[in-house]
Image (cartoon, rainbow, N blue to C red):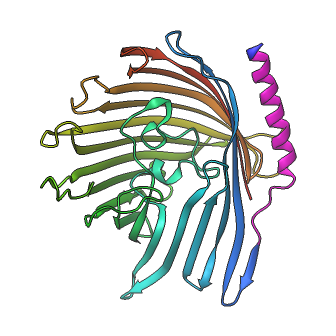
Amino acid sequence: MQRGLIGLGIGLMTLLCLGLTAFAQEGGTIKVAQGDLTVGGYIHLWGTSVQDDETQTDTPDVFAARRARLILSGHVVPKVAYRLQEELVLGNATSRDALIKFEDITLGEKFIINITAGQYKYPLSEAGLKWGTPADELVRGPWIYEGGNGAAGTISDRDTGLLIDGAANDKKLKWFLGIFNGKGTNNPETNDQKDLMLRVTAALFEKGSSLEGLGFGLGYMKGAQGKEDEASGQTGMELRTRLAGTVQYEKELGGGTLQTRFEYLSQKQEQNSANDRLNWDDAETTNWYFQVAYKLKHGFLSGENQALQPVIRYQNYEYDDGDLDPNDTDWEGTMLTVGANLILNKQTRLMINYNSIDDDTWVAAKAKRLDLDNNEILLQLELKF
């Protein structure tokens, strides 16, 4: 019965996807005074069927509107860009992006920079930039950003602050330098400390070389969280560092495009016990993943920009709470994802994934640690306009 319902769900979502391709067009650009306005949006629907571990309460199968966003972007005047992105899903309605970007500021004869201010995705890692955006990421985002399956010690991929970026060597070498609140999406600042972020990416091999599509990235972020507690005389500040390293490769191969990426992400945060403010320790999170995809053209649907993209990803996640919790809330998990993306046009794609999940975690209802196997079928339909 359950497999039949999943099959019906796949069929209905496919039909919906085919119907929407007729209406999925590029957002229209409107001339406004000296600038321009582009009205766009993003709809993300998904369905899940979870095969729970026998030691857990059954998780219901779900169809949901994961995201429905209105995006306004353009220029106030030439080279002064803006972007507003609002989440409209009931129960999750909130601002995502609100930024102004000063483009192509020339310093000297050849040195050009961009300056971005506001709330937006900060470029600490490749996954942080791409996860959850239309037709960019290949599979569901890594746990350190998404927090899926009960993962602890996660981070936000958006923040509010100021970013300066530039490039050299025909944009083969790029750098990003930013200062942020460090509080995530739509959260107010609570102290005078700011998070400093630096990222460098490099794709140094010449065009035509077998290594032309090989790229590297390294990101580092450091700051402090919390606020001073004058009553107790303690600073209450928690020092935090984040690190991201990326190696990726893309190459045209056999009539299709091969894409691979390895990325390592970590966070170390000094924390203090709720019961003993003088007892400080470090909580550490590490998350790495490796993914491979092959994008090939298909002809069983008429139209341009159609492709079938098989994809596989393996990720490992570990969270160490620093031994501050007597219940041992450390969390370890792995997930193997096997699936395919059916790209119907530039605006629409259907994603089908099977996630094999194994995690070792503290289960409060059982008052002990358990080794759990929670496998999942995940359907996603993405439409941008």
Image location (x, y in percent) of residue 23: 85, 55
In the depicted structure, whether residue 48 falls above or below residue 201:
above
Q: Which of 263 and 60 is in front in this view?
A: 60
Q: Main secondary structure of the magenta part?
A: helix
Whether the magenta-drawn stretch holds residue 287 is answered as: no
Q: In which quarter of the image is residue 62?
A: top right
Residue lying furthest front: 231
Q: Where is residue 193 in the image (x, y as percent from the top left)?
A: 25, 64
Q: Is residue 7 magenta?
A: yes
Image quarter of the C terminus: bottom right
Q: Is residue 234 visible?
A: yes
Q: Is residue 200 left or right of residue 138?
A: left
Q: Position of residue 362 (x, y in %)?
A: 37, 21
288 on left or right of 28 = left
- Residue lying furthest top: 54
Question: In this view of the protein, which residue sits in the foreground, 161 or 382?
Answer: 161
Residue at (74, 16) in percent of width and height: 3
The correct choice, above or below, for 165 with respect to 304 in the image is below
Residue bounds of the magenta highlight: 3-28
